[in-house]
Image (cartoon, rainbow, N blue to C red):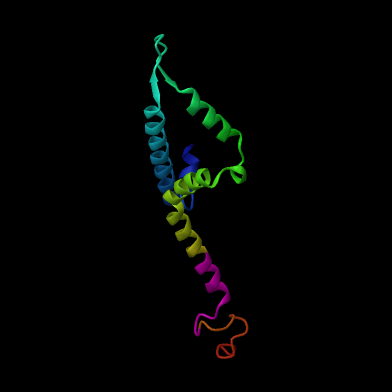
Amino acid sequence: MTKENKTWENKELFEQLAAIEHERWADWQKYLHSKTFSDSQGYGQVIGRDDFEHWRRQIKTDYKDLSEKEKDSDREQVMRYWKLIQKEIDKAVEGERRKWVCQNCYKYPATLCPHCADE
């Protein structure tokens, strides 16, 4: 990231999402490390063949072709940041609504409101 990027309109949201991503990555690393074992030849930690093959298959698989259990795992990760995204969507929708709905009666499109047309 460069200093120029510090003027983003939504830097706070971006940083909140980055913090969630770091948490997600750290949790993955804890899980991954729990699946390793010491190599008898002294090469360090290795991943078991079954885990390796399982993850290799998942890497090559499009989301739409995953099992529901695998999709649920991905959905669980999205839930970490979904509330922040939904909040931003709601703010954007509200902003658009204000542009189009009469701000006096909130019942009619702003350009067609019979009560406010004379204003």
Quarter location, residue 83: bottom left
Please tell me which residue lies in front, 29 or 63: 63
Classify residue 14 as left or right of residue 118: left
Residue extent of the magenta highlight:
93-105
As displayed, is residue 109 above or below residue 52?
below
Please tell me which residue lies in front, 76 or 101: 76
Please tell me which residue lies in front, 53 or 92: 53
Q: How many marks?
A: 0
Place of residue 62 in the rendered image (x, y in percent of width and height, measured from the top left): 62, 41
Q: Residue at x 61, y 37 (%)?
A: 61
Place of residue 99 in the rendered image (x, y in percent of width and height, measured from the top left): 56, 72
Q: Residue at x 38, y 40 (%)?
A: 23
Q: Residue 97: say if magenta.
A: yes
Q: Main secondary structure of the magenta part?
A: helix
Please tell me which residue lies in front, 89 or 36: 36
The quadrant of the image that shows the C terminus is bottom right
Quarter location, residue 6: top left
Q: Residue at x 41, y 50 (%)?
A: 12
Q: Residue 103: say if magenta.
A: yes
Place of residue 69 in the rendered image (x, y in percent of width and height, measured from the top left): 50, 45
Q: Residue at x 38, y 37 (%)?
A: 27
Instruction: Tell which residue pokes out farthest to the top in this image.
Output: 41
Place of residue 54 in the rendered image (x, y in percent of width and height, measured from the top left): 52, 31
